[in-house]
Image (cartoon, rainbow, N blue to C red):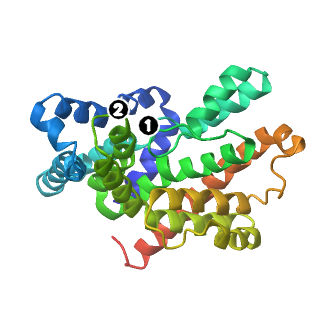
Amino acid sequence: MHLIIIVIALFAERAFGQLKRWRETDGFARYVAFIERSRLGARWLSHASGVLVIVPPVLVVALAQWAVVEYLWLGFELVFGVLVLMLTFGPRDLWEDVYALAHARGEADHDQAEARAVALCRRTTGRAATDIEGHTIVGAVLIQGHERVLAVLLWFFLAGPAGAVFYRSVRELPALAARGTGSKSLRRAAEYVHGAAAWFPARLIVLVYAIVGDTRRALAAWPAARATTHLSAAASWRLLAVVGRGALALPRDTRSPRFERQLNDTLLEALGLISRALLVLLAGLALLIIFGVLR
């Protein structure tokens, strides 16, 4: 059932653009802001234990998931899963963001291109990247392919709608902690939880990037990332960017004017790599179901 829900959600997400506004409402940020309004809530979020703020929404979705499966017919499970999965993608559509950046660059709209590039390269903590050069933007696209789509799908397949809500929440929490009333201990705890949740999906996606891209260059780039065992989101992001650029067979001199001129084509190639990785991931999950390893 999970694989069927994933396929329908991906199709619907592509076909019905107006639904994308739903997931841009940033309900998790509003939920955290609501807790911060009270003195007790603000005190809670000022400690490392504030990372448990992700538990209530995940628990609510998990209970709803159990109730739908146990007491309602199959169609309700399908609709519930598709709705939750679509709301946990994003929050913005990666393909639209990259196309908008490429269009702005093509039209020589430098201000708009810079704004789009800054948004793509924003770090997990919400801080702006130190640079928005071509190789950084390509790496950011490959990272966002994992963060916005692929990791959400893997967590959904593992734990259903509750898994998708869990990853969407832990991904957003570090940025919310950095700009809210959270202490350094909360920010560190949020980054640690995000890193733990992303560790296995990131390495699986990196392996898929290598399979569907230039395998030799991707595997050669893997040791350079120095992030094989590090349990942090930053290490996983670095691994996705470095190995992904290797899978795209990018030239060593990515700071050359020629590379910058061809950046639009490279960005579209990065989207193609993510799309191929998605297809391979779905095929792998289908095989696991066929052979009875997963349901």
Task: Give me the residue at 13% from left, 52% from top.
Answer: 67
Mark number displayed over residue 55 = none
Mark number displayed over residue 26 = 2
Residue 245 picture quarter: bottom right
Foreground residue, 165 or 115? 115
Residue 289 picture quarter: bottom left
Spot occupied by residue 206 in the image (x, y as percentages of width and height): 58, 65
Q: What element carries label 1?
A: loop
Task: Give me the residue at 66% from left, 60% from top.
Answer: 242
Spot occupied by residue 205 in the image (x, y as percentages of width and height): 55, 63
Q: Distance between the residues labelled 2 and 1?
A: 7 Å
**Crowd around label 1: few <14 · some 14–19 · many ≥20 (10 Å):** some
**Amino acid type at image mark 2:** Asp
Which quadrant would the C terminus be assigned to in this image? bottom left
Residue 240 picture quarter: bottom right
Task: Give me the residue at 35% from left, 53% from top.
Answer: 188
Q: In this view, does 286 lie to the left or right of 160?
A: right
Instruction: Please indicate, yes or no, whether residue 165 appears anywhere in the rendered image.
Output: no
**Crowd around label 2: few <14 · some 14–19 · many ≥20 (10 Å):** some
Instruction: Please indicate, yes or no, whether residue 155 appears anywhere in the rendered image.
Output: yes
Mark 1 lies on residue: 91
Task: Give me the residue at 63% from left, 56% from top.
Answer: 241
Quick one: label 2 or label 1, which is nearer the N terminus? Answer: 2
Q: Is residue 278 left or right of residue 98?
A: left
Spot occupied by residue 135 in the image (x, y as percentages of width and height): 72, 48
Asked if marks 2 and 1 touch (Cβ < 8 Å), the reply is yes
**Amino acid type at image mark 1:** Pro
Can you say whether 259 is above or below 196 in the image? above
